[in-house]
Image (cartoon, rainbow, N blue to C red):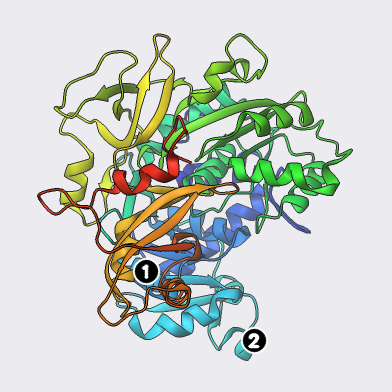
Amino acid sequence: MSAIANVAGIVRTHGVGRPEHTALIEGQRRLSWADVYERAQRTSQALASVGVGAEDRVAFLDKNGIEHFDVFFGASLLNAVAVDVNWRLAPPEVAFIVNDAEAKVLVAGLDFVPILDAIKDELTSTTKILVIGGVGEANGGYDDFETWINGFDAQDPGVEAVGGDVAFQLYSSGTTGRPKGVMLSNDNFFSLLPMAKEIWELSGDAVNLAAMPLFHIGGGGWATAGMYEGCTTVILRELDPAGLIDLIQNEKVTHGFVVPAVLQFMLMMPNMEGADFSSLKILVYGASPISEEVLAACVEKFKPCKFWQAYGLTETTGAVFNLPPEDHDPNGPNKHRLRSCGVAGPGVEVRIVGDGGEDVEVGEVGEIWVRTPQNMLGYWKMPEETAKALTDDGWFKSGDAGYLDADGYLYIHDRVKDMIVSGGENVYPAEVENVLMKHEAIADVAVIGVPHEKWGETGKAVVVAAEGATADDATAASIIAFAKTQLAGFKCPTTVDWVTELPRNPTGKILKKDLREPYWVGRERRVG
């Protein structure tokens, strides 16, 4: 395994070394590692034919599927970078990311032809658009992806990436009102992947579940960790809790990563009763907290499966803190640790930093800083934002506030930044506020996160009405509907409150903490 040091090395190694082993399962489709390698080679030749070369970006817009891996590995054989776009985004958001990435090629699923139609004339760098499935009128007249790649020979171009080259570019929501392209290098990934076997017991015999969206680090990153070992990856195209229960049983899934909301929904499904989860060995959860009630029920339902909690960010290539299985006994002596994120992973340093830049004492709350080989290269074409997030000596400022206990367990307390986490999706109020300010009924607005039973938290718009506008339910509904034309649904506020003015400090900054406080009274953690 030590020979694999970049993304292309995964498909090259296993395509030759274990060609007959099943690599991908999606519904009735089964691809061996030889098949995956062959498709990647054809894709690489097709991409090269339209001018894609080293470190060029290729955009991908579709739900989870085999074609994600065609593009991901095909681009890697050229040392190009696949940029998976969040398929929940509204057309203006998709256009922004494709243009920002300077993607030469855009591959999209059939479901997203309406988005292609809406944005095709706005794309500034894209010279080739392809659609997965259907031809002619069935896919809007765009070229068919499968036909396109099958017109090229299966020949590996033989380009080798180096450690500092970008392997993944994932887009976060925008702290500054625009999404940011997080550049993750081969070194970032391959400092973590060898440890996946040790920590999460991933191996070449595993049957790994890719259930979370592949445009997320918890989806694409998790799938890559299993594929590094040469295992079988089972793709769930779209999250369906009842279908997920059946899939685990039918495919004898051994490993998986999910967000807590998924576990909560699974427990509610009728087919949970009597389900056979005996194949499950490891379930990793993260991206948002889990309640002790849900966890206790899952530990019982999924016995003898081991549970791990993972805390990390896109900017840290995923997990940097892990809560191990032995700390998951709701009735054990260490049950208080269930409120923590666990301990630092191998090679991860942590600081808890006060307002003045000093390290605070054990048990005191401050901003969580981490230093690890997993820390991103930076934000694509955003040097000022990169400088704010990464120090010269390699520390990443997470924007989360928390504290360490005497045993080194990390507890999340609050957010330094205003980010909202709704169902495992990051939402940055600045991005939402910039859109809402275009609405004619709004003179001023602040978006805050408030508790939500299913999603952990959800967005609320606190609005000062424009002169002549009516501050009523009809106007509130109009504001929410307008947001949905410009933003992904999960980013949109679900409620609107009206105020005569927003609280601000002497420099004019909105006091979000004061706005949030009434909704979080009585809760130990000010995050969902």
Tag 1 residue: 98
Q: Is residue 161 visible?
A: no
| Apparent side of residue 118 relative to residue 455 in the rendered image (left or right) | left
Nearer to us in this view, 496 or 490: 496
- In percent of width and height, residue 413 lies at 39, 30
* Extreme-bottom residue of the structure: 137
Nearer to us in this view, 489 or 466: 466
The residue shown at (37%, 52%) is 448
The residue shown at (77%, 53%) is 243
Residue type at tag 2: Ala
Tag 2 residue: 138
The residue shown at (79%, 44%) is 251
Q: CA distance from mark 1 to mark 2?
A: 24 Å
Q: Secondary structure at mark 1?
A: helix
The image quadrant of residue 126 is bottom left
Give above or below for 23 relative to 106.
Answer: above
Nearer to us in this view, 109 or 490: 490
Q: Secondary structure at mark 2?
A: helix
- In percent of width and height, residue 346 lies at 42, 20
